[in-house]
Amino acid sequence: MLPLPYFALGLSGLLWQTVPVFHTAVSAIFLLLTYGALLALLLPFSNRLVPENDTPLSRIDERDIMFSRNLLQVDSQRFETYYKDNPDKKQLDDKFRKRPGLMQEGALYYDPFTTSAAEASFKTVAAFHAMLDEENLAERQVKTDPAKMSHFLKLWSKKLGAMSTGITELKKYHLYSTIGRGERYGEPVAIDHAFAIALTVEMEKPLLDRAPHGPTVMESAQQYLNSGAIAVQMAEFIRHLGYSARAHIDGSYRVVCPLVARDAGLGEIGRMGLLMTPELGPRVRIAVVTTDLTLVTDERTRDLSMIDFCRRCQKCADVCPSKAISFDGQKEINGAMRWQINSEACFTYWCTIGTDCAYCMRACPYSHPNNLLHNSIRLGLKRSPLFREFALKMDDFFYGRKPPAAPIPNWLNPSAQ
């Protein structure tokens, strides 16, 4: 890829010579952008960013996450026990239970077609659950070279549809402490695998641009399915070689996927509490495979420029309709410096509109397409704090501080009426 200064100069010169409409006020804006980028990259500014501890001290109880609490049946023994142990959450959860519900008729943006498409994807993901804890290993282990096997798994996962893949040692804080969903609810999580393979898949921008309407939950569910299918296939492959492996996919996780993916070098945890990847920002879904197959881990290189951009940007907090994303700086939570969203407020809004919203993902400047122009801008964001400020103002100018939802295309409404 061309360095940003050469790309900026070349593109602006080409447009000036070949595109008549460029001889307008648009030219001044574009030249300001390109030469501003050039200036920001040439000036000798240092990042001066100091890494802070982001390793949690203890494990998360999956029973406490909103998806688990949403599955509690009112007046059931599990329901009564949970809120007896957690009385502070009862009043908060009563609010989302008074709403129509995620993907439920009566919700503000309920649509029978996109909802049915999403339900079809989630049901297909659930069909994989019976395979996840299988230990039908080959009788004889195939000897493998850790470096060659790691290389193979990364390339194969991308052939299967992964956007990025990384490997890390499995840490205790990666694991949930207690299972919060399914038949094994309440059991302690006990996985002794040594390694974890994290993978991401892309959520298509044209559908996320319709957020918070039905296409977002349709695309979200589709990518949970796609990431899950890759992980299940990889785990089955490893078991065929005679090694233990488990896929961690939607509805049946034993690990906190964003933490695993972060430590595998795939991104950072941003202000909105999601994994921010360098290629697509938060516009990904994650799956994980844990295994005792010996692999070569990826060294995590902390991208402090991305954390610094999240500190400055605050766009996701601005657009969040439920005010669940904080404007404040990072705080120490469970020993780690990070941002904390109000998950109850977020989920209650989901249950009001019937989709998983995605305002924050759509508005994030890192979510722009993975192409030459935006990758050049991402290069500037990584190199210069001055450019981060400049790029943020330009993003607001061209896309808006609160970008409106794109219209829903006709093909997503196959109604006969």
Image: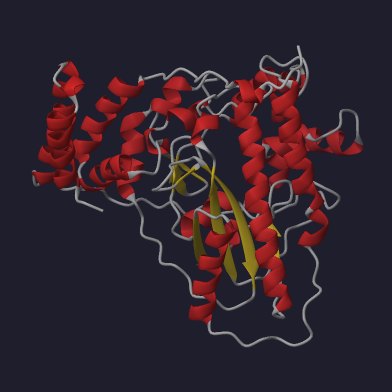
Asked whether, in this view, residue 278 is left or right of residue 207, the answer is: left
The answer to which of 324 and 233 lies nearer the viewer is 233
The quadrant of the image that shows the C terminus is: top right
Picture residue at 10% right of the left edge, 38% below the top: 39
Asked whether residue 170 appears in the rendered view, the answer is: no
Q: Position of residue 413 (x, y in %)?
A: 68, 21
Q: Position of residue 16 (x, y in %)?
A: 13, 29
Residue that extends furthest to the right in the rendered view of this protein = 76
Asked whether, in this view, residue 63 is left or right of residue 378, the answer is: right
Q: Position of residue 409 (x, y in %)?
A: 57, 22
Report the number of discs: 0
Asked whether, in this view, residue 160 is left or right of residue 20, the answer is: right
Please identify the quarter of the rendering in which residue 395 is found: top left
Asked whether residue 394 appears in the rendered view, the answer is: yes
Picture residue at 55% right of the left edge, 24% below the top: 211
The answer to which of 173 and 131 lies nearer the viewer is 131
Picture residue at 65% right of the left edge, 66% below the top: 234
In the depicted structure, whether residue 149 falls above or below residue 323: below
Please identify the quarter of the rendering in which residue 37 is found: top left
How did the renderer colour the structure? secondary structure
Q: Position of residue 118 (x, y in %)?
A: 71, 34
Asked whether, in this view, residue 181 is left or right of residue 3, the answer is: right
Picture residue at 54% right of the left edge, 55% below the top: 162
In the depicted structure, whether residue 234 falls above or below residue 149: above
